[in-house]
Image (tube, helix red, strand yellow):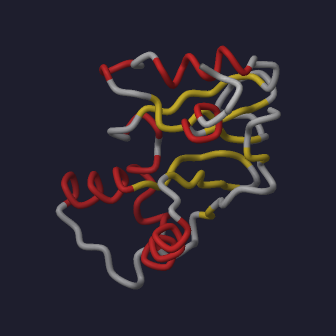
Amino acid sequence: MDYARKGDQGRKAKLNQRVMRLMEVMEKNGISNVPVMKEGLFCGVFSQGSIFMYVLKGGRNITKETTLQDMATQLKIEEHPENYIFLPKSVSYITARNKFIRPAGRGKRISVIFITETGHQDERLLGMLTPWDVLRDPNCT
């Protein structure tokens, strides 16, 4: 948790948010993955992969009126081309760092580690780690 962006500090989105506006904010701030919340709980991730799958699988265009709710199926982590995992708040720095270094399922690296109380997806999101959060530590060799 010392390296994580705390749940109340990072960018989050709600299902009623417009996709184009969120994309503008992400591009401006260099954000790749945004957790999507419903009633304060994690319900998915919005990323470039979400857009790709929305267009590819549904043959739909994204307009200024498209909301995250319209893309709800593509926000589920099991629908993403990226890999995400959940770990408990007690996870050590080394364990989290190693998760980013070693390829995960589907032979792809992990994009984000989401931190919850016990590491389950249906719990309140306490924080998130990206490779940049743990691999940039100057004390690591």
Q: Is residue 13 above or below residue 79?
A: below
Instruction: Tell me if 38 is positioned left or right of 82 in this view.
Output: right
The residue under the point 39% across, 19% down is: 103
Classify the position of the N terminus by image quarter. top right
Q: Nearer the viewer, residue 115 or 68?
A: 115
User: Number of labelled discs?
Assistant: 0
- Front residue of 121 and 24: 24
Image quarter in which the C terminus is found: top right
Q: Is residue 125 above or below residue 108?
A: below
Q: Residue at x 51, y 67 (%)?
A: 26
Q: Whole-percent x and y of residue 40?
A: 76, 53
The reply, left or right, for residue 59 in relation to residue 138 is: left
Residue 119 pos. (x, y %): 70, 23
Choose top left, top right, bottom left or bottom right for residue 106. top left
The residue located at (75%, 19%) in the rendering is 91
Q: Quadrant of residue 97?
A: top right
In the image, what residue occupies the spot 67% across and 33% down?
A: 137
| Relative to 96, residue 64 above or below | below
Say if 18 sits above or below 106 in the image.
Answer: below
In percent of width and height, residue 33 lies at: 51, 52
